Structure formats: C-alpha cells, structure tokens
Image (cartoon, rainbow, N blue to C red):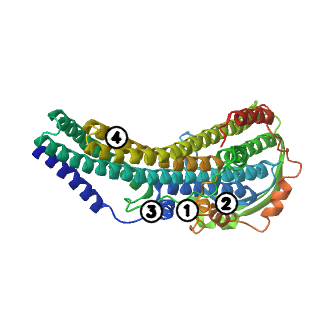
C-alpha cells in the first residue's frame, strides 16, 4: 500500500507541474488559429517564397525597357619581332550603349503571361500551405481537449478504484468477502495507475505538438466551436472542391504558364527588331587617355534579325515545351482525382465519426446507469466485486471512446473543408487580419516601369504565335466518369 501511495503521489505531482508550467494563452480556437496564422514558420516561409516569385514579373517585364551599358577597356601589347619600330603599344576606349527592343515576335509578351500564371499558381500553393497549417492547428487543439478529457477520466477512475479497494479491504476484515476479491481490486487499481501515467504522457505529447504548430503551450482550452460551412451533401462538397481546391487551381495555372512557354518557344522562329545607339571613343596611348573625348563618335541605328538555322535548337525547345505542357495537363487531371479521393475519404470519416459519437453518447448513458445499479446490488450481496470492477471498466472505456469520437468528427470535418478549399483564415475567423499576397505583387509589378511599356507590350503581341491548349492528355469526360463512380459509392447521411 505504501508503494502504491508513492506512485499516486508521483503521478499527481506530474499533473500539477504540467498544469503550472502551461501559460493560459490561446484559450479559444480562434486565438490559436490567429497566432499560428501570424507566426507559423511554414506559413511565413511560403509567404516569403511567394514574394520571391513576385519578382519574376519584374524580370519578365524588363524586356519591354531599354538596356544601357557602359564599357571601358584598356589594352597593352609588346612586339618581339626584330623589325618592330616601337615594340610597346597600348590603347584605351570607353563607350556607352543603349538598346530598345521594339518587337520580339511574342517572346517578351508570352514570357509575361507565363510569369503571371506562375505567380497565380504560387498563390494557390500558399493557400494550400495555409489550409494545411490551420488544419494542423485544429487537430492539435482537438487532440489536447481529447487527451485532457481522457486524463480526467483516468483520474476519476483511479479515485473510484481506490475507494473500491478500501471498501473491499474493510469487508474482507469482517469476513464478508474473500481475499480473492481484495486481490482483484488491487489488480484493477494497479492497471489504472498505469493507464493514468499513459494518459499523462499522451497529453504531454499533444501539448508539445500544439506548441510546435501554434507557437506556444496550450492553456485552459475552450470547447471546440462549430466549424463554419461543413457540407451535408456529398455532391455539393465535390462540386465546391473541384472549383476551389488549391491543388487543382494551382495545376490549372501551371498549365497556363506551360502553354505560354510553348508559344514563347515558337516565337524563337520569328524575327525581332530593336533600336541601338552608342557613344564613345578610343585612344592609342595611355598617356593621352584624357584626349578620348576629342575622338568620340555617336552611332545610332535599327536592327532586324531573323533566325535561319539554329542547328535544331529552336525545334528542340518547342518539343520540350510541348511535353512540359502535356505534363502540366496530366497534373491537372491528377489533382482532380486526388481531390475526389480526399473529399470522399474525409466525408466518409466525418459520417463514421458522427455515428460513433451518437453511439458513444448512448453507451455512456447506459454504462452510467448500469454501473450505479451494479454498485447498489453489490452492497446487498447480489453482485460480486468483480462485477463492480468490470462495470466500472466498461463505463470508463465508453467515456474514452466518446471523447475520441468527438475529436475524430471535428478533425474529419476540418479535413473535408480543407479538401474543398474552404479552410482558409477568412473562412474560420472573419475578424482575422489577413495576409494578401497581391499587395506585394501590386507593389513590385511596375518597378522600373517606363511610359512606353504598355505600347511595347501591345506591339510585341502583334502576330505573335497564339497560345494553344495542350491536347496530349486525358480529357474532361474521364474526370466526370470518375466523379460519377465516386458519387455512386460515397456514404450518405
């Protein structure tokens, strides 16, 4: 008994220390989501990646603007021949050159289109990371609540079994029960101590996971609120997912970029025109380098170039771009199928958890009534000590199953919303201060812009190779057929 008391004291001490060490922050799910939205490393890194991707539009549009270069050179030569009159010679030159592309056959215009599509695809990837992070917050929040409830159940069970052992020992002293009944109570109490220790360890693991994704340890968490927008119709959930899932949308934008790259590769066959100008001079003696200005010259002109033979380079680039566009088209279909699978799986898990929750609620109610009845019957000798212990075990198991069912249903609903593309910050908390990736894009897009950018871009798109959709990939009817098959086999309310 002394050893058991020490174990109980140790477990209680661990619980107290853990509770004291937890700051009472992020008490509601909205607060936890807001903190993770602002500080989660994965989300912050993806936002930085998106800002880096925004620079591609600046680089693509730089082709619309003139290029200015300064060149300064110096040379020294020594002639070792016997006939050289002056074996040493040197020269210096300096010039400034200006060039402006007037028309590139569409290479610049299609490059801008591809960059814009890549940026839009990056925004969808940011949405995907945001939903993944917020889903992780929801899961961690639900795990802590579940494990806290399980720990409470284990603690209550330990107290009940402790009293049961004391009662069994007292009844054994007066000869009402045998030593076997006492041993049964001792065995169940020892198992309860082990279960309590496991519950405490699991809660510590869940708290650590919460701190990792949210950014701080959980305090006294409020009950889980109702998630907004959870669908009750499977067909409607699929339709929303096919339209809003970030994976599908990102793949579609990547396809647009790939098709623009095909057109840009074809534009390599087209002629290009540019204006050029240079100003500079040279001198054949370093000692008179200051006199370069006396021998300067201004040159200006226009250049039109047309590729006639590139050794198969342009053809290979077009073929490569076409295959990459086909890959992008196939990826769109792949993302659709993955989304269908994710929605179907999450919807089925949500329904299953709902059924388990309803059954668990009834099981706890019935087990509570049965446990009280068995305890009263045992007091008048109609039930044995083992009957009481078994009924207590059944009650605690039902309570734990119910706590797990609540968590499972909530997480399944969150996963369903994520598969649909409806688990963003604005969906979960309308008051959340949102990060808008378009702000940085709007800020950097026209960096270095000149008044004639729009005119040059419009001219460059004249007679440019058109953007043709990729065709060497599965067509939409395959997707519709797959959707029909999943709808037919999906679980219903």
Q: Earlier in the sequence, mark 1 or mark 4?
A: 1
Q: Earlier in the sequence, mark 3 or mark 4?
A: 3
As drawn, the label of residue 244 is none
| Relative horizontal placement of residue 355, taking residue 97 as reference (left or right) | left
Q: Earlier in the sequence, mark 3 or mark 1?
A: 3
Front label number (1 vs 4): 4
Q: Distance between the Cα atoms at labels 3 and 1?
A: 84 Å
The residue wearing badge 1 is: 287
Which is more toward the observer, 380 or 40? 380
Q: Distance between the Cα atoms at labels 4 and 2?
A: 96 Å
Q: For numbered disc 1, what is the local secondary structure?
A: helix
Q: Distance between the Cα atoms at labels 1 and 2?
A: 19 Å
Q: Distance between the Cα atoms at labels 1 and 4?
A: 108 Å
The residue wearing badge 3 is: 222
Q: For numbered disc 3, what is the local secondary structure?
A: loop
Front label number (3 vs 1): 3
Q: Distance between the Cα atoms at labels 3 and 2?
A: 72 Å
Q: For numbered disc 2, what is the local secondary structure?
A: strand
Pinpoint residue 245: horizontal percent, then vertical percent.
66, 48
Which is more toward the observer, 237 or 280? 237
Which is more toward the observer, 321 or 278? 321
Q: Earlier in the sequence, mark 4 or mark 2?
A: 2
Tell me the crowding category of disc 2: few under 14, some 14 to 19, or many 20 or more residues within 10 angstroms, Cα based: some
Q: Earlier in the sequence, mark 1 or mark 2?
A: 2
Pinpoint residue 388: horizontal percent, then vertical percent.
29, 41
Q: Judge whether 37 appears above or below 315 on screen.
A: below
As drawn, the label of residue 95 is 2
């Amino acid at each position: 008994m002394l050893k058991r008391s020490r174990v109980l004291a140790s477990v209680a001490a661990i619980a107290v220390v853990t509770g004291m060490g937890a700051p009472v922050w992020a008490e509601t799910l909205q607060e936890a989501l807001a903190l993770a939205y602002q500080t989660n490393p994965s989300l912050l890194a993806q936002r930085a990646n998106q800002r880096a991707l925004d620079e591609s539009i600046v680089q693509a549009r730089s082709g619309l603007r003139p290029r200015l270069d300064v060149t300064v050179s110096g040379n020294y030569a020594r002639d070792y021949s016997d006939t050289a009159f002056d074996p040493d010679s040197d020269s210096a030159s300096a010039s400034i050159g200006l060039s402006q592309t007037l028309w590139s056959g569409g290479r610049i215009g299609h490059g801008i289109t591809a960059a814009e599509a890549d940026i839009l695809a990056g925004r969808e990837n940011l949405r995907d990371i945001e939903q993944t992070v917020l889903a992780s917050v929801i899961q961690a929040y639900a795990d802590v609540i579940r494990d806290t409830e399980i720990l409470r159940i284990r603690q209550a069970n330990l107290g009940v079994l402790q009293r049961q052992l004391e009662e069994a020992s007292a009844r054994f002293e007066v000869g009402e029960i045998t030593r076997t009944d006492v041993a049964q109570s001792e065995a169940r109490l020892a198992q309860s101590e082990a279960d309590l220790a496991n519950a405490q360890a699991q809660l510590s693991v869940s708290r650590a996971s919460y701190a990792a994704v949210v950014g701080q340890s959980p305090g006294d968490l409020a009950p889980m609120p109702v998630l907004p927008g959870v669908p009750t119709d499977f067909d409607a959930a699929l339709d929303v997912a096919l339209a809003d899932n970030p994976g599908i949308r990102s793949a579609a934008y990547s396809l647009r970029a790939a098709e623009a790259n095909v057109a840009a590769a074809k534009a390599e066959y087209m002629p290009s025109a540019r204006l050029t100008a240079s100003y500079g001079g040279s001198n054949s003696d370093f000692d008179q380098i200051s006199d370069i200005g006396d021998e300067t010259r201004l040159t200006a002109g226009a250049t039109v170039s047309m590729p006639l033979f590139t050794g198969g380079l342009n053809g290979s680039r077009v073929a490569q771009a076409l295959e990459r566009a086909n890959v992008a088209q196939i990826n769109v279909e792949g993302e659709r199928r993955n989304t269908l699978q994710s929605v179907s799986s999450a919807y089925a898990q949500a329904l299953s958890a709902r059924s388990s929750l309803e059954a668990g609620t009834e099981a706890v109610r019935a087990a509570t009534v049965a446990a009280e009845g068995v305890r009263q019957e045992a007091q008048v000798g109609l039930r044995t000590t083992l009957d009481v212990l078994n009924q207590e075990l059944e009650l605690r198991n039902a309570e734990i199953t119910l706590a797990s069912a609540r968590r499972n249903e909530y997480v399944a609903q969150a996963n369903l919303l994520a598969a649909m593309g409806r688990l963003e910050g604005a969906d979960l908390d309308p008051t959340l201060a949102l990060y808008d990736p378009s702000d940085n894009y709007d800020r950097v897009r026209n960096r270095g812009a000149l008044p004639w950018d729009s005119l040059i871009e419009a001219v460059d798109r004249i007679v440019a190779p058109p953007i043709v959709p990729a065709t060497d990939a599965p067509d939409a009817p395959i997707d519709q057929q797959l959707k029909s098959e999943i709808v037919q086999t999906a679980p219903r309310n």
